[in-house]
Amino acid sequence: MELTYRMESDYQIPNMALPEGPPVALGKYALLRKKYLKQQRRVLYLNLLTTGTLNSHLMEIEQTAVEQIELLTAQMAAAQGVDERLKAESQLLWVGRMNNIRACAEEIVLGEIVYG
């Protein structure tokens, strides 16, 4: 790889550009991961950015987080007896418990995958 330089004042600045990639739509967990990397893990963020692997990393985090939340929600609901029978008997109770289960699952995933 051959580098070229441009003069700015008395300095030679290398002509470098980030690798171009297709635009991707990032989900909630990918955006949270990107923000975390920018603020807390700056070196890792810059390494991913300059090697052109940031978007693939973020998409992997998004996919993994969504899958884990779905899995944990199903497991926790089964363990707590939150099923279709409860939904038919008392919708408000079912909704409240499912919201609580989903919030717990999301908190686990955020701690282990997004911010881990």
Image (spheres, rainbow, N blue to C red):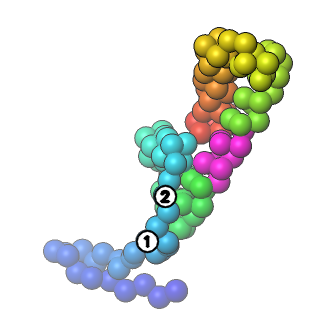
Look at the image and say whether residue 100 sits in the magenta stretch. no
**Nearer to us in this view, 26 or 55:** 26
Task: Tell me the kind of residue under disc 2.
Answer: Ala
Labels 1 and 2: the sequence-earlier one: 1
Q: Nearer the viewer, residue 13 or 103?
A: 103
**Does residue 115 appear to the left or right of 35 in the view shown?**
right
Q: Is residue 108 left or right of residue 39?
A: right
Can you identify the residue that label 2 sits on? Answer: 25
Q: Which residues are magenta?
A: 60-68
x and y percentages locating residue 30 in the rendered image: 54, 47
Q: Amino acid at mark 1?
A: Leu
Q: Residue at x 27, y 82 (%)?
A: 6
- As helix, strand or loop, the secondary structure at mark 2 comes to loop
Secondary structure under the numbered disc 1 in the rendered image: loop
Query: Residue 3, how many percent across, how many down?
Result: 42, 84
Crowding near the residue tagged with mark 1, few <14, some 14–19, many ≥20 C-alpha atoms within 10 Å: few
Q: Nearer the viewer, residue 108 or 17?
A: 108
Residue 18 - label: 1
**Residue at 16 percent of width and 74 percent of height:** 9
Residue that appears at 59% across and 55% down? 59
